[in-house]
Image (tube, rainbow, N blue to C red):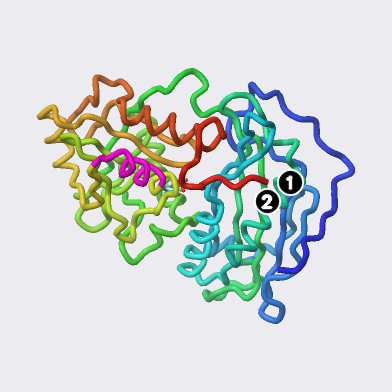
Amino acid sequence: MEEIRIQRTEHPAPKPDPNGLGFGRIFSDHMFLMDYSLELGWHDPRIVPYAPFTLDPSAMVFHYAQEVFEGLKAYRAPDGGVQLFRPADNGQRLADSCERLCIPPVPVEDFVAAVKALVEVDAGWVPSAPGTSLYIRPFIIATDANLGVHASHTYIFCIITGPVGAYYASGIDPVKIYVESADVRAVRGGTGYAKCGGNYAASIRAGERAEAEGYAQVLWLDGVERKYIEEVGSMNVMFKIDGKIVTPALTGSVLPGITRRSCLELLRDWGYEVEERLVTAQELFDAGAGGRLEEAWGTGTAAVVSPIGEMGWEDKHVVVNGGQIGPVTQKLYDTLTGIQWGTQPDPHGWTVKL
Ligand SMILES: *Cc1c(COP(=O)(O)O)cnc(C)c1O
């Protein structure tokens, strides 16, 4: 990658109240941009003031959703420094998503360099209140002005960032989830393993329906047999059954989460037996009815871990661990957040300081 040009804003925005950050509503002063063309490849990396894009109404991304994205965070450590968590893994996953969507990949080292450069320019936007962080959203969009269905020849790689609040502002509350039997999020051979906007478009209806019924998230089943558990909302999912950790295998329709991978590595470090395999909803509800479903939780960058306290599936109902967060879920949360915010040792070398 060429050297990143930096154009600083002349109108820096006032920093928001750290108590009212929420998620995804406030954006930092700058963004990273890089263009792609057939002639020049990825070129002109630059950091510029955060501003709207001008795109042709026929730009391919608007019509055929040729788009991929990532999500990671920068954390303020106790010494005042700023650190990232496994950013090269996000870079590799973006490249894998690109391959699926016929988008020319950004080299992993360029992805990491771009994220670091942008967070350095906007380091003042990394909040320091407990549990807060700077959310980083890299994405690539197809920009050819052309309604023909084929791979675009031009793209924009953009990274925006914004401060986000503590996910659990008032303690970790286990959530109620609903097993979705009608809509599916992804199928093998589709784009389930890629992080792309299209997967989300397909998931919104079931999410809205579950919310209207008083559930926080949807538990997705596989798209072919509607039998096997895949993910929970936009998180991976794990269960503790009879002392063992069980999680859906990465069959192609499951997103390979970096929090998932990190949890599995920690659980193996701690001596747990970990099974990555097909898990049926029936097995889960049988374990629940038999008192063998000890814990259940989702994993993802936003929440880190999200305990599941109750599950509904058609007329069946299961309460997990009395609706309370379980000890393994709590230990994963404490350990991962400790590593991410730099308050605990990082034996795997997952963090990258700016
Ligand atoms: C991003 C995402 C996850 C979680 O991935 P992390 O790398 O852990 O943040 C899980 N499922 C879906 C569908 C996702 O988009």
Residue 40: quarter of image: bottom right
Q: Secondary structure at mark 2?
A: helix
Q: Amino acid at mark 1?
A: Glu
Please name the residue that numbered disc 1 is placed on.
Answer: 120
Q: Residue at x 65, y 72 (%)?
A: 154
Q: Secondary structure at mark 1?
A: helix
Asked whether mark 2 lies closer than 8 Å to ligand 1, one says no
Give the numbered dot on residue 336: none
x%, y% of residue 98?
Answer: 52, 66
Task: Using a 10 Å C-alpha cutoff, classify the residue at mark 1 as few (fewer than 14 neighbours), some (14 to 19) or many (20 or more).
Answer: some
Q: Nearer the viewer, residue 229 or 90?
A: 90
Q: Answer left or right for 124 relative to 244.
A: right
Give the numbered dot on residue 116: 2
Q: Amino acid at mark 2?
A: Lys
User: Would you say the magenta stretch is mainly helix, strand or loop?
Assistant: helix
Q: Residue at x 64, y 21 (%)?
A: 19
Q: Nearer the viewer, residue 324 or 275?
A: 275
Q: Answer left or right for 45 relative to 257.
A: right
Task: Using a 10 Å C-alpha cutoff, classify the residue at mark 2 as few (fewer than 14 neighbours), some (14 to 19) or many (20 or more).
Answer: many
Q: Answer left or right for 346 relative to 222.
A: right
Dot 2 and dot 1 residues touching (CB under 8 Å): yes
On screen, residue 138 above or below 244: below
x%, y% of residue 33?
Answer: 72, 59
Magenta extent: 262-272
